[in-house]
Image: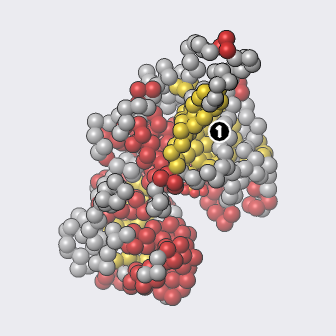
Amino acid sequence: MKNNIPEAAHVIPSDFIIIGGAGDLSIRKIMPALFWRFLDNQINNKSSIIICVHNILNIEDLKSKLKPHCKEAIEKEIENKEKWSSFINLISIVVLDVVTGLGADNLSAILKDRNDIDRPCIFYFAISSSLFGNTCNLIKNAGLNFPQSRLVVEKPIGHNKLSAIEINNKLSEFFEEHQIYRIDHYLGKETVQNLMALRFANTFFENQWDNKNIDNVQITVAETIGVADRILYYNEYGAIRDMLQNHLLQLICLVAMEPPSYFDADQVRDEKLRVLKALRPLNANEMQIGQYQGYENELGKVSNTETFVSLKVSIDNWRWAGVPFYIRTGKKMATRASEIIVTFKKKPHDIFSKLKEDKEEDAPNRLIIRVQPQEGLKLKLTSKAPGPGGMRFFPSELNLSFGDTFSERLPDAYERLLMDVARGNQTLFMRLDEVLAAWDYIDPIVDKAKKTPPQLYRAGTMGPEDKILLSNGHLWIDPKDDKK
Ligand code: BG6
């Protein structure tokens, strides 16, 4: 126990096999996450990491690709330099062509003797979903689909419901549902999990968490980066399929779901599924799409792909009837910030109204859940100004900044999720029925978007001028870029 925080859950030695191991995801996210977990002794020398690459790569080249992304970890403590070398010793590189199967023998030569049923054999597919079928075949033919094998697949799964079903049919020919971990890294973010703690480990908020007390919910996931070298992928998918279908819908689920009986994988996912099924199909005037200026120049051709989307989402159930969930996400926006803002209803009667010279309304209470950066929670209140000058009011806030409260760094989402796979915990991974229900909601939205040219917006702004909230008597609350 350190600072009243229980020790991290134990993880047994495992094999991590990363298909697409030299790709961007592996180098920027998966490998640094494994190194941080190694530094925290959650992964030890008995584990192994097998990097499967398409083209020959030697360990020195891999090291120099990884180093910039592991720099903070290497430099954090003096002894970490030594641990970096021990970590590198865990790695083997296998050249593997997942289409022809060339190189599979080398992979099975390393893993064949793994008859320890308790040792997880984790295949991370950091590759395009069009290669999932071939790769599963290859694993099966190489005799590597052990009972303890687990498969991690990235979103988006498919580009619509039909293709998601096809991909999942392929996966389930070779692996059982309990072996498949569909990752949505937003679920691994500290504040996203804290949202569940806030709601279900306390009584305070849950009593207020409904349409009697909440006026509206806003979720913003704004990025300052553009699409850069992912433009070919991105142009096929757009913001709706890249971000909305997964990350934003998952955030809505966590805000809106009923308390499960237990924090157990299927119970949590059952409740999220109920939210997805309660989403009301969208009207045309409840969506706006935009594209940042200069996108077509980057792409080198005309394109209607949206780099921004905003929606008014309605949830048809007793708890949320009449409460709009406004959500938006975009690239090249003014600030990098992800926030969930819950605005509570105004008080029914103002006992101080006669004391106030200006008749301006007090701001309503707001709960701001800052997912990133500067993770934390703020509760906006109205307080009395100190001193004997009469009952004067000012907006104040209760502020829980995780950065200030925990001196330790906050682990990246991938660290938590990879350790959950090794521990066999599927709570923070999407079940097939959730993915399909998300596509049920998204497919008609994609069809609508295809019929509407995106509105252009200037890079460095918060997207095109709002048309949705205003007509509902609301305004977007822009995330503050405060460094506090
Ligand atoms: C990915 C999307 O899933 O999430 C990217 O494909 C996006 O387009 C990224 O940039 C955002 O993740 P984060 O953790 O930086 O908010």
- Mark 1 beta carbon near ligand 1 (under 8 Å): no
Q: Position of residue 32 (x, y in %)?
A: 48, 71
**283 or 64: nearer the viewer:** 64
Q: Please state if 391 lies on the left or on the right of 26 as rendered.
A: right
What quarter of the picture does the N terminus occupy? bottom left
Q: Position of residue 149 (x, y in %)?
A: 29, 65
Q: Please, is residue 247 above or below residue 101 in the view?
A: above
Q: Residues within 10 Å of mark 1 (few under 14, many from 20)?
A: many
Q: Please, is residue 352 above or below residue 185 in the view?
A: above
Q: Please, is residue 129 above or below residue 375 in the view?
A: below
Query: Where is residue 36, by image quadrant?
Result: bottom left
Q: Is residue 462 visible?
A: yes
Query: Where is residue 449, by image quadrant?
Result: top right
Residue drawn at 34 percent across, 54 percent down: 4
Q: Please state if 59 lies on the left or on the right of 287 as rendered.
A: left
Q: Report the image quarter containing ligand 1.
A: bottom right
Secondary structure of the residue carrying numbered label 1? strand
Q: What amino acid is labelled 1 in the image?
A: Ser
Q: Is residue 362 visible?
A: no
Coloring basis for residues: secondary structure
Residue drawn at 72 percent across, 20 percent down: 360
| Farthest residue, direction front | 388
Residue drawn at 37 percent across, 47 percent down: 431
Q: Please, is residue 171 above or below residue 371 in the view?
A: below
Look at mark 1 in the image and give the residue it sits on: 310
Q: Please state if 419 lies on the left or on the right of 95 as rendered.
A: left
Q: Position of residue 70 (x, y in %)?
A: 52, 74
Query: Where is residue 220, by image quadrant?
Result: top right
**414 or 117: nearer the viewer:** 414
**241 or 341: nearer the viewer:** 341
Q: Please state if 151 lies on the left or on the right of 118 as rendered.
A: right
